[in-house]
Amino acid sequence: MKLRKTKNKRKNGCPLYGWPFLSWYVNIKKRKWGSDMIDAHVHIERGPYTKEWIMEFISYAEKRDIDRLYLLEHSHRFSDFVNIYDSILENKDCGEYQREWLSRKSELRLSDYKDFINEMRKYKFPIEISFGLEICYFPEKEEEIKECVSNFDWDFLTGSIHWIDGWGFDHPKTKDSWNERDIDNVYKRYYELMIQLVQSNIFDILAHPDSIKCFGHYPSSDFTNIYESLATALKESEMKAEFSNGLYINYGHKELGLNTDLLKILLDNNVQIVTASDAHRPEDVGKYIMEARELIYKLILNRSTT
Ligand SMILES: [Zn+2]
Ligand SMILES: [Zn+2]
């Protein structure tokens, strides 16, 4: 059974999502070059559930010429999802910190967020906005996740890997837990979990598909085959993959978006790429989306001329 309820079906053959049919050099309607400007990953978590708060995000989106904004909350914010995080509580390296982190974060009720979305759907906003969730994926918790997201027409569901067998690899406070780990094995397990996420058919969008590089650790072995398997799974599941500026913005990582090897393989396999800021505050909405598009377009055009 597919739970996904996406309203954003693919409309054309272009790998960059939002590219208008037959007018990809010039978007006549909007009088500008290229596709719709999309920011597909914006957290609204630092403010109240009010229209005024949403308007702050929209105001920055308009300043940066964004046409479509995907607003979301992270699953760890809700007490309803707390059971999917069982494996992080007992982790031998970071369990204590992670337990405290989760109990501090999971203070909201999902029903309040759903009520807020229903309320916001009554308004006409100056740009297209969608509401969804970023959900941490744990393979042993698929049924619980499905149960949590059922009975509501989410605009989109984004799936992310933030935990590897109970270990939160991207928390700045437990950065030292990377020491002593076998980097290649960490990467292999990360992508194994990611492929399971994609094959679960719960999600519409895969979040930040190479966030494992967050603290600058890179594998020594070749990941081409693994990237190919991920691309095949994404294509079969009709999921989009993010080109995420999140590490660039939030971690000071030097590379904007996806690593080129993985991006090329996704494009070769016709996986749709969606641009995303992973903004956690209104000021970061739409940040570097233009630069991300230029980078992706360049790669697409280079591929088509070589
Ligand atoms: Zn994330
Ligand atoms: Zn996020």
Image (cartoon, grey):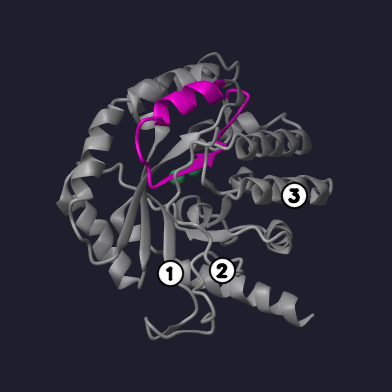
**The C terminus appears in which quarter of the rendering?**
bottom right
Does the numbered disc 2 mark a residue whose Cβ is under 8 Å from ligand 2? no
The residue at the far front in this view is 1
Residue receiving disc 1 = 37
User: Which quadrant of the structure image shows residue 114?
Assistant: top left
The residue labelled by disc 3 is: 227
- Residue located at (46% from left, 67% from top): 289
Q: Badge 2 local density, few (<14 within 10 Å), some, or many (20+)?
A: some
Residue that badge 2 annotates: 12
Pick whichever of labels 3 and 2 is earlier in the sequence.
Answer: 2
Image quadrant holding the N terminus, namely: top right
Q: In which quarter of the image is ligand 2?
A: top left
- The tag earlier along the polypeptide, 1 or 3, is 1
| Spot occupied by residue 259 in the image (x, y as percentages of width and height) | 67, 58
Q: What residue type is labelled 2?
A: Asn
Instruction: Answer left or right for 47 relative to 232.
Output: left
Is residue 142 covered in magenta?
Answer: yes
